[in-house]
Image: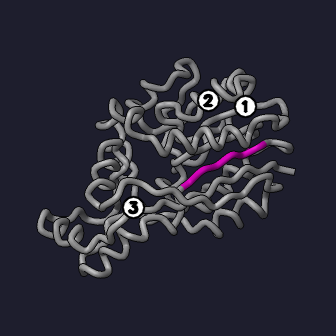
Amino acid sequence: MAASFSHTVESRFGRRADAYDSQAVLQRAVAWRLVRLLRGQALPAGSCADLGAGSGAVAAALAQLAPALLQRQPLQVDCSAALLARNPVADRQRLWDLNRGLPPDLHGAALLTSSFALQWLDHPASQLGHWCDCLLPGGVLALAVPTAGSFRQWHQAAADSGIPCTALPLPAGPELVQAAGTRLQLLACQQLRFSRPAGGLALLRQMRAIGADASPAAPLSGVQLRHLLRHWPAGPTTWELLVLVGRRP
């Protein structure tokens, strides 16, 4: 993905920032699941950060489930100023494009969390390896990311209709597990499946509502979209997510 796509991602989320918290139900639920896996984990002294923090779903979960971790003052890192403006951790924010790697002051981190962010980056497996390498010995990484098994119904509709699939290309779960597993002791590794509203139109509207509709593919025309939706399989659309927690030896 080129720098122009990174700008597109930031722009889409920025335009929809006011609606994000009320609409991003799955993202909020997964942030809570991630924090539950973190509770009770011992951490070394060092910096902490939430990567792709956005409006603060992970921070909100930490406040409710693991306030001691929130007291470590995790830096809220995101490329969208509009989303960070809604983040409750107002005094620890960094506007930063994670395609540049981690900010230098996070090289030697005690805790890195990231939920629904890695998929937007160039070369996600390499970026994940870099995050792991930036942990201190004993440091912990907690990750949630949608993976390539998502949106099978969308891909099927595109194949059946002959219309290009404009879904964001998602990273392969096994590749991410390998990138982390060669560097970390994996404490949790779950491949989860979630269902979202029935029908393609409902899914596409919900993604647009939160600004998660950026894609490197060319947008469809109205005629193409209607043809695609006529071939969309009945029933809910599925997401597949990798949830992973690991500690650097």
Nearer to us in this view, 84 or 210: 210
Q: Is residue 51 left or right of residue 228?
A: right
* Crowd band around label 2 with a 10 angstrom C-alpha radius: few (<14), some (14–19), many (20+): many
Task: Read off the magenta span.
Answer: 140-145
Marks 1/2 in contact by CB < 8 Å: the verdict is yes
Q: Which residue is mark 1?
A: 47
Say which of 203 and 73 sits in front: 203
Tell me which corner region of the image, top left, top right, bottom left or bottom right, holds residue 71: top right
- Horizontal and vertical percent position of residue 13: 36, 41
Q: Position of residue 49 (x, y in %)?
A: 64, 35
Res 157 seen here: yes
Element marked by disc 2: strand
The rendered magenta stretch, by its main secondary structure, is classed as: strand
- The amino acid marked with disc number 2 is Leu
- Amino acid identity at mark 3: Pro
Q: CA distance from mark 1 to mark 3?
A: 41 Å
Indicate whether 179 appears above or below 55.
Answer: below
Label 3: element kind: strand
Residue found 70% across the figure and 33% down from its top: 48
